[in-house]
Amino acid sequence: MSCYFIAQIKIHDRAEYQKYLDGYDEIFSTYRGIVVAVDEEPLVLEGEWPFDRTVLIRFPDSAEARRWYESPEYMELVRHRHASSKANIVLVER
C-alpha cells in the first residue's frame, strides 16, 4: 500500500537549511521514494499556510518510508534541518 510523507516546514536559517538540501539527493536516491512535489509558494485555497516549504513524497509502503527516515545516513543529515527549521511531518497511507 502506498505511503505518503508530507512535510510542512518553517525555515528560520536558510544557510543551515541549505546544508540539509546539499546532502539530501545522495541519501534519498538509495531508497524507493519518489518526490511528488516540493513547493515554497503553494496556492492556498482555504485557511492559512504559514510554512516556507511543503514536501510530498510517495513510498511503496510505510516500511520503506521509515527505513529512509530512520536510516543512520538520514539521521546524520537531518540535524541540519532540525537546526534550521521547524516542521510538521506525517506519513499517510493510501
Image (cartoon, rainbow, N blue to C red):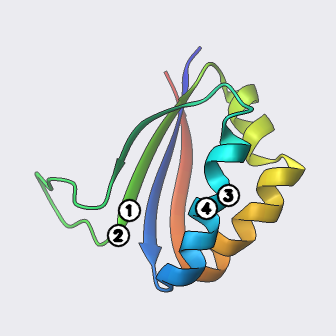
Q: Residue furthest right?
A: 72
Quadrant, the N terminus: top right
Q: Are marks 2 and 1 in contact (CB under 8 Å)?
A: yes
- Give the answer, above or below, for where 70 lies relative to 64: below
**Mark sitting on residue 52:** 2
Q: Are marks 4 and 3 in contact (CB under 8 Å)?
A: yes
- Give the answer, above or below, for where 93 lies relative to 90: above
Q: Are marks 1 and 4 in contact (CB under 8 Å)?
A: no
Residue 16 in the image: x percent, y percent?
59, 80
Disc 2 crowd, CA 10 A, few/some/many (<14, 14-19, 20+): some
- Element type where label 2 sits in the image: loop
Would you say 44 lies left or right of 9 here? Answer: left
Q: What kind of residue is marked 4? A: Asp
Identify the residue position indicated by label 3 in the image: 23
User: In front of the other: label 4 or label 2?
Assistant: 4
Disc 3 crowd, CA 10 A, few/some/many (<14, 14-19, 20+): some
Q: What kind of residue is marked 1? A: Arg
Residue 26 in the image: x percent, y percent?
69, 45
Label 2 to label 1: alpha-carbon separation:
4 Å
User: In front of the other: label 3 or label 1?
Assistant: 3
User: In front of the other: label 3 or label 2?
Assistant: 3
- Element type where label 3 sits in the image: helix
Residue in the image at 45% along x and 77% along y: 11
- Element type where label 1 sits in the image: strand
User: In front of the other: label 1 or label 4?
Assistant: 4
**Mark sitting on residue 22:** 4
The one of 59 and 91 positioned closer to us in this rendering: 59
Identify the residue position indicated by label 1 in the image: 53
